[in-house]
Image (tube, grey):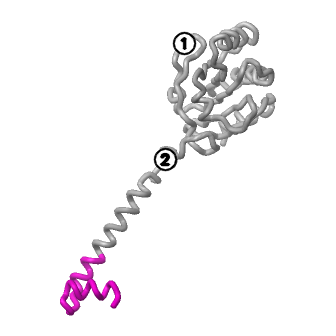
């Protein structure tokens, strides 16, 4: 005897009752719909539900870091604006060259926020990095310190530095590049960021 027949027999004592059957199927359908709705309710709006991570198309991980003067800077404060985030180390010549390229491009793209993140943590390296940035290179965009390395860990991919992320105005990772950027590559990537 099938399960449906057993259920029908139990409810009707051998007699077919369409009302019981309809009620049973309605309850079963309601339970299935409830489970499916709960599992898929997060898929209603794309930008709000994107996975957070360093992959292209994901929501860029949020962070709050101090700049070289101790001021707190939060990525969330730049919502609605495209952001270029460059991770660098003061002992990396290619990183410093890239910062110069980005500093120049900052003048050409005032609608884009540029952030540099120094991945050095010891105090003496921070002092050295601040001196290089402010006195030698004259970098004018915000330079932040990732003292505990957590922000770098959220964004890191591969083993090469510098790494540069391009976040669109919706907070999504539009592009990510590792290794020193040339001016042409950086300029083209920023233009793609502004005109997707």
Q: Quadrant of residue 25?
A: bottom left
* Quadrant containing the N terminus in the rendered view: bottom left
Q: How many marks?
A: 2
Say which quarter of the image contains residue 54: top right
Specify which label sits upstream in the sequence, 2 or 1: 2
Residue 51 placement (x, y as % from top left):
54, 45
Tell me which corner region of the image, top left, top right, bottom left or bottom right, holds residue 75: top right
From the image, tell me which residue sits under label 1: 70
Main SS category, magenta section? helix
Q: Nearer the viewer, residue 80 or 143?
A: 143
Q: Is residue 37 left or right of residue 115?
A: left
Q: Nearer the viewer, residue 47 or 117?
A: 117
**Is 23 contained in the magenta span?**
yes
Which residue in the rendered view is the most extreme toward the left?
Answer: 13
Which residue sits at x=31%, y=68%?
A: 30
Give the residue at x 60% y 23%.
146
Residue 58 visible to an observer of this rendering: yes
Residue position marked by numbered label 2 in the rendering: 49
- Element at label 2: helix
Q: x%, y% of residue 10?
A: 22, 85
Residue extent of the magenta highlight: 1-25
Q: In the figure, 158 relative to 137: above or below?
A: below
């Amino acid at each position: 005897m099938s399960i449906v027949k057993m259920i029908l027999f139990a409810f009707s004592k051998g007699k077919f009752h369409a009302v019981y059957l309809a009620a049973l199927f309605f309850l079963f359908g309601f339970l299935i719909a409830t489970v499916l709705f709960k599992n898929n309710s997060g898929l209603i709006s794309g930008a709000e539900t994107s996975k957070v991570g360093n992959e292209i198309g994901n929501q860029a991980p949020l962070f709050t870091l101090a700049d070289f003067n101790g001021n707190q800077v939060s990525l969330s404060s730049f919502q609605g604006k495209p952001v270029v985030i460059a991770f660098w180390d003061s002992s990396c010549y290619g990183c410093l060259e890239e910062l110069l390229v980005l500093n120049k491009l900052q003048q050409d793209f005032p609608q884009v926020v540029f952030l540099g993140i120094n991945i050095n943590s010891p105090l003496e390296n921070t002092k050295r990095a601040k001196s290089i940035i402010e006195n030698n290179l004259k970098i004018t965009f915000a330079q932040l310190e990732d003292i505990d390395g957590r922000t770098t860990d959220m964004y890191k991919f591969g083993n090469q530095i510098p790494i540069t992320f391009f976040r669109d105005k919706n907070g999504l990772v539009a592009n990510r590049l590792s290794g020193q950027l040339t001016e042409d590559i950086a300029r083209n990537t920023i233009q793609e960021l502004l005109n997707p």
